[in-house]
Image (tube, grey):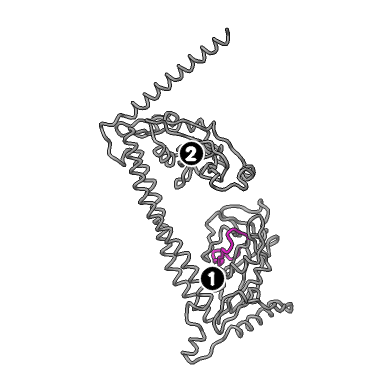
Amino acid sequence: MNESALHELAGGWVWTRLESCIEILDSQRVPINADEREKRIAGKPTSELYPYYGATGKVGWIDDYLFDEELVLLGEDGAPFFEQAKNKAYIIKGKSWVNNHAHVLNAIADVTLNQFLCNYLNVFDYHGYVTGTTRAKLNQSPMRKIPIPLPPLPEQRRIVTKIEELFTRLDAGVSELKKTQAQLKRYRQSVLKAACEGKLVPTEVELAKVEGRDYEPADVLLARINDIRKRNTKGKYIEMPTLDISDLPKIPEGWLWVQAQDVCNWITNGYTPKANKMFQGNGEIPFIKVYNLTNKGELDFSKNPTFISKETHKKELSRSKVFPGDILMNIVGPPLGKVSVVPDIFPEWNINQAIVIYRPLEGFDKKFLCYSLLTDNILSWAIKRSKATAGQFNLTITICRNLPLPLPPLAEQRRIVAEVERRLSVADEVARTVEHSLVQAQRLRQSILKKAFEGRLVAQDANDEPAGVLVERIRQQKQLSNQTNKTTRRKANGNKSR
């Protein structure tokens, strides 16, 4: 233990190593793969099964148990050691089975508490103790050497009680914030649903009657859009099949249900080049992947931005070109239904094979198309007709082209878009406030733990037996136990030699 790297402790506290405070029960772990566990639990009721634990929590069930007590499990490999907001250790109680991805620890009675250790191990900085690059691992040897700031046992109890009290109140606040997040998600969907069913703003029919004027209904608008499409196809125009609207919501007078291919000039997916033709950082042509799409209509290209060369963009991926104003939707999930408008940050972009392009024709507002694609009704229609591959739903290009879309009069489309954006901008502002509050709550959690292990969370009591005395007593007991064991072994060996 590097004493110079440790901060000064409060009175009665002592720096010690983790191995001095715990029993390590790793030798009792038994890993069993998922297939074997499934065979063992097949046909058995849950009441006869026991939790099976791994690096970060319960990973399944099994029909037997190895432990029957309160224990601290600390990730050995696969735990988020360098993510401050995530737990690396957790407490289990009762009958359980633990695999070899978690260290099994038990606090030594009269020295420390499992709850105290667990909280400390969740705030400890594991740099210098964990090895590995692709998968971080905390081997037992460095784990044993983890430095622990140990207070007197009564103070440990007061610290644990105070942490639980503060965390209970904090958790209640976080729970309310998450409820608000869920409510905002439902609100967004209700706004989009109302928008695409003609219930968000007065319809063009209603306004025309009140104002005593004519309006262009959707069937006339569609005929105009089809004229544009005919010109674009240069004599290769194909009449679209009739759309089955039996399972679609009712829409207002003056609207039509149309297929995406009725109102879009280009619907196709992209293509992914070989890995050596893509690169990170600044580049020529931005290459969009599914994780860059959002469920809010905005593209997030700040996440792992990838680029390709102009040559690859022009020669190999010409069909994958997208431009500002194009609408993108992922066709491979989960989750499906992420939709984004291509921004004008770059004049040209490119997409991979898991994304489809919708390029609306004049007369179909691009943002109205975006909001339509984001509604649950449209997504449900597509999923019902999709195929599941390896447990995930994928949409075909045919489904994307046949996708039903509501077509209101153009003036109404624009009024709907303006109202949707007004309402969702308010919801987004609330969402940002909630997200900020959740970040603050996590920081407060870390601050509470930091104060706890610096001796600043509860008051010290001069009557408490110093932790150093406890540790020394345990050390002497271990030394005496080791000497007794050696003597017993020598006697046993001597008897054998006779």
How many other residues sit within 10 Å of disc 2, few (<14), some (14-19) or many (≥20)? many
**View extreme (top): residue:** 498
On residue 273, which mark appears? none
Q: Which residue is mark 1?
A: 371
> 397 and 171: which one is in front?
171
Q: Which residue is mark 2?
A: 73
**View extreme (right): residue:** 236
Instruction: Locate the C terminus and report the quarter of the image it occupies.
Output: top right
Q: Above or below — where is 487 with respect to 467?
A: above
Q: Above or below — where is 385 with respect to 175?
A: below
Q: Residue at x 48, y 86 (%)?
A: 207
> 147 and 38: which one is in front?
38
Q: How many marks?
A: 2
Q: Residue at x 54, y 69 (%)?
A: 375
Q: Where, by quadrant of the figure, is residue 3 drawn?
A: top left
Q: Rounded to the nearest whole Å, what is the CA distance between mark 1 and mark 2? A: 46 Å
Label whose residue precedes the other's in the sequence (1 or 2): 2
Dot 1: what SS? Answer: helix
Disc 2 residue type (three-letter)? Leu
How many other residues sit within 10 Å of disc 1, few (<14), some (14-19) or many (≥20)? many
